[in-house]
Image (cartoon, rainbow, N blue to C red):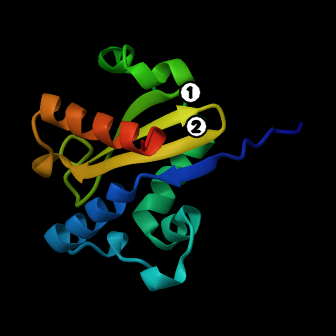
Amino acid sequence: MNIPIMLLSISVCPKVWDDIKFLRKKTRNKELEAAFPENEQNDDEGRISSIPVLKVITTYIIQTNGTSFDQSDKYDRQPFLTQGWTIFKLRYAFDNKGSSHGLRIIYCRNGDNFLLVYLNLKTYCADERTLEKEFLKRISDYLCPF
């Protein structure tokens, strides 16, 4: 029996790298440290593969193919969804506190394209409305830069 493997194109909003730097300073967790110096990676996939927590998250998303997640009703009326992009929110257990206090990951999918938008601990996330404005701005800046 052959199992089809879907290869996704992975992209990252530039501010996600700022999120990673912020979390490195706040948590001092080794899972956020890059295995290689940052200046050696030229593309997003290279940088993702050098940071253990990002590698685990992207591998999980790719393997589940987005089927285990439901799209949030709050986000189903956004203008860029007409272009085929769907927003997903994922919780990830981090720092031995469980997923309810762990990382909040916002990402988008459009067919075979995957866009990592936002990454932060729940402790440092703003309220839901401010958080929504932040990641919607990131998505629109990335998809429609002009």
Q: Residue at x 22, y 65 (%)?
A: 23
Q: Residue at x 38, y 45 (%)?
A: 117
Give whichever of 102, 139 is nearer the camera. 139
| Helix, strand or loop for disc 2 | helix
Residue 48, numbered circle: none
The answer to whether residue 45 is seen in the rendering is yes
> Which sits in the foreground, 139 or 10?
139
Q: Quadrant of the C terminus?
A: top left
Rounded to the nearest angstrom, the CA distance separating label 1 from label 2 is: 6 Å
Q: Work out whether residue 128 or residue 85 is closer to the camera in this orientation and state it.
A: 85
Q: Which residue is mark 2?
A: 64
Can residue 106 be seen here? The reply is no
| Number of numbered callouts drawn | 2
- Using the rendered view, name the quadrant where residue 127 is placed: top left
Residue lying at 21% horizontally and 66% vertically, measured from the top left: 22
Residue beneath disc 1: 67
- Asked whether the residues under the numbered discs 1 and 2 touch, taking CB atoms below 8 Å apart as contact, a structural biologist would say yes
Q: Would you call the spot at circle 1 few (<14 residues within 10 Å), some (14-19), or many (20 or more)?
A: few
